[in-house]
Image (spheres, helix red, strand yellow):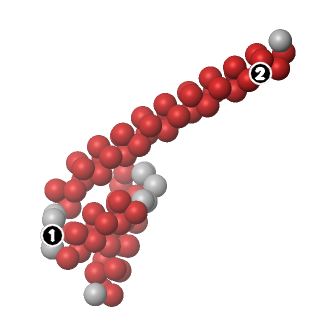
Amino acid sequence: MQLNLYVAIIGIMLMYLQTGFRPSKYMFAMMSMVATGGATLGDITPILRERERRCALARESQRKRNAKKRAEKMKQQTS
């Protein structure tokens, strides 16, 4: 069992080097599946890329909402 943990951690670090995406709990869970034989790296790579794409879109959307709120707050303070 401990070997699976090390395999997953090494896999996450290699994925980070390859993709540049910050490791996440989701990535760890997917790499654990690979370590136990439940999936292949080829199976999970597109899933992880899509998840990271969606997370990036969500971060950008949140950044825009926060900027809009700050602008509205500044506008109210100057009025």
* Residue furthest to the right: 78
Determine whether 10 is above or below 3 in the image.
Answer: above
For residue 26, what is the image quadrant? bottom left
Marker disc for residue 38: 1
Name the residue rendered at 34%, 60% in the picture. 27
**Residue type (three-letter) at the residue carrying disc 1:** Gly
Q: Is residue 8 visible?
A: yes
Q: Where is residue 61? Give x, y as percent.
A: 49, 31
Determine whether 36 is above or below 69 in the image.
Answer: below
Which quarter of the image is occupied by the N terminus?
bottom left
Q: Where is residue 28? Give x, y as percent.
A: 35, 66
Q: Secondary structure at mark 1?
A: loop
Which quarter of the image is occupied by the C terminus?
top right
Determine whether 6 is above or below 23 in the image.
Answer: below
* Residue furthest to the bottom: 2
Q: Is residue 14 visible?
A: no
Q: Find disc 2 in the rendering and name its residue.
A: 74
**Residue type (three-letter) at the residue carrying disc 2:** Met
Determine whether 56 is above or below 65 in the image.
Answer: below
Q: Is residue 64 left or right of residue 31?
A: right
Q: CA distance from mark 1 to mark 2?
A: 52 Å
Crowd tier of the residue under label 1, counting other residues whose Cα lies within 10 Å: few below 14, some 14–19, many 20 or above? few
Name the residue rendered at 77%, 21% in the picture. 74
Marker disc for residue 60: none
For residue 36, what is the image quadrant? bottom left
Q: Secondary structure at mark 2?
A: helix
Name the residue rendered at 42%, 51% in the picture. 21
Q: Nearer the viewer, residue 44 or 77?
A: 77
